[in-house]
Amino acid sequence: MSSSITLDDRDDVAGSAADAGGRGGRPLRLGDPASVPAVTGLWTAHDDVARLRDEWGDAAPVELAPGARAWLVTEYRTIVEMARGRFPLSAAAGTWSGHTGRPGAAASPLLQPLVASRRPIVGQADGTLHERLRTPIDEVFGSVDESEAARITRATCEDLAGRFAATGVADLVREYVEPIPHLTFGVVMGFDPATARQVFDAAARAGAGDASAVHEVSFLLTGQKTGPAGRLARHAAYESTAEAALGLLSLVATASQGLRAWLGQTLHLSLTDARFASRLTGGQLGIDEALDEVLWAASPVSALAPRIAAEDFLLGDKLVQQGDAVLLGVGALGSDPGLRAQGDTSGSRAHLAFGAGAHACPAPRLARLIVRTAVETLHHRLTPTLALRPEELRWTPDLRFRLLEALPVVFHPENAPEGTS
């Protein structure tokens, strides 16, 4: 963590619900306001988050979907404390009180992270169960050959760029950003490209509630004898191949969205922010510094996986009640006035985009390697220009990640005859 950013260890962040009566008035509950801001659109500009803070403070009630609310926390120190388990919060989505009377929750992309899995998965587990399910993932990623991962990633990115480099036009999301996760991360895991595509497609279906995805991936894992996927399938901590498949599906779903979001947001910023682009192409900003600046200033991660209050507790003048959903809004930290007052965040990796505590991302180094290589490869070969006005770009509705629907560009084609463009 940068020396300019510190975490105060004071214990006055939260109190118990019993403290509420002595605060000079009834604390705000999630259902109290007649109307609250919708979480969609809050991540598009720091001004929106600033207005939210002005109105509600560092914990604001927001609407996820009609009739479904959550607390959005936007203060750095509190987010760190929550991610490290110092509040009575659970990762178990099934304890969310909003499930009551909401049979259509699985159909909403904004509510999907709050839909409980029918079987134990690492992202929705706490305590010893989480530790058991997380151990195989940590051990497998600890054994990944990063030099081989770099080779696979560079070859993949060169191949993808080569497919459209001579055309002069491309949709970087469809033709570059979206294929990279399964063609790099999937292959690094030990799958051939076709099987990696199957696994990633299955992860998308599993996220939409398709139970057959678990059986499909279980079958694919039984054929993996070597490599990270093979080690994952045979790990002693898993009680069945189905548990290994669920672990892989959860991992792949997050990796796919996270890689797409970080890469897409970096390319987006290089095409729409002249200052960022000139510093990057002019050598004033190293690629790793640029990636960190994206994580601070235009975070591809809007919020960490939702937490659910396990009991009532007081958060400032807000009463978080058992069953309330709590969003750890790391996408708002770039505008946190407390951080700005402490100094420049440039070069700091305390951005929390990878989370903190037991549920932190298991492979931040691999993610950085893939995104860095993809950005370097594209900008080395091409000098793209955005084909639309920035305000015409559209974003996929998602609670946790900022995902572009498309990123159309034009550029001077490679190997074009002299005098053409």
Image (cartoon, rainbow, N blue to C red):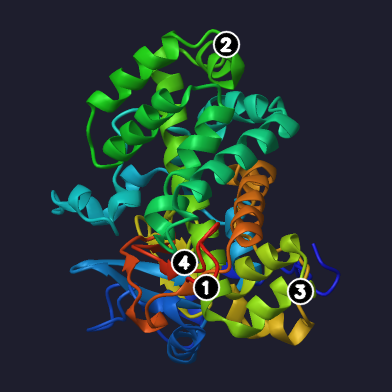
- What's the amino acid at mark 3? Ser
Give whichever of discs 4 and 2 has the lower sequence position: 4
Q: Distance between the residues labelled 2 and 1?
A: 63 Å
Tell me the number on the disc at residue 236: 2
Residue 316, x across and y down, in percent:
53, 77
Residue 367, x across and y down, in percent:
62, 46
Give whichever of discs 2 and 1 has the lower sequence position: 2
Q: Which of marks 4 and 2 is in front?
A: 2
Give whichever of discs 1 and 3 has the lower sequence position: 3
Asked if 384 appears above or below 112 in the picture, the reply is below
- Secondary structure, mark 4, is helix
Give whichever of discs 3 and 4 has the lower sequence position: 4
Residue for point 36% across, 21% down = 217
Quadrant of residue 283 in the image? bottom right
Foreground residue, 419 or 193?
A: 419
- What's the amino acid at mark 2? Ala
Residue at mark 1: 419
Give whichever of discs 2 and 3 has the lower sequence position: 2
Residue at mark 3: 346
Foreground residue, 220 or 4?
A: 220
Q: Which of marks 1 and 3 is in front?
A: 1
Residue for point 40% across, 25% down = 194
Asked if 401 appears above or below 224 in the picture, the reply is below
Left or right of residue 109: residue 234? right
Residue 87, x across and y down, in percent:
56, 57
- What's the amino acid at mark 1? Gly
Residue for point 52% across, 27% down = 133
Tell me the number on the disc at residue 17: 4
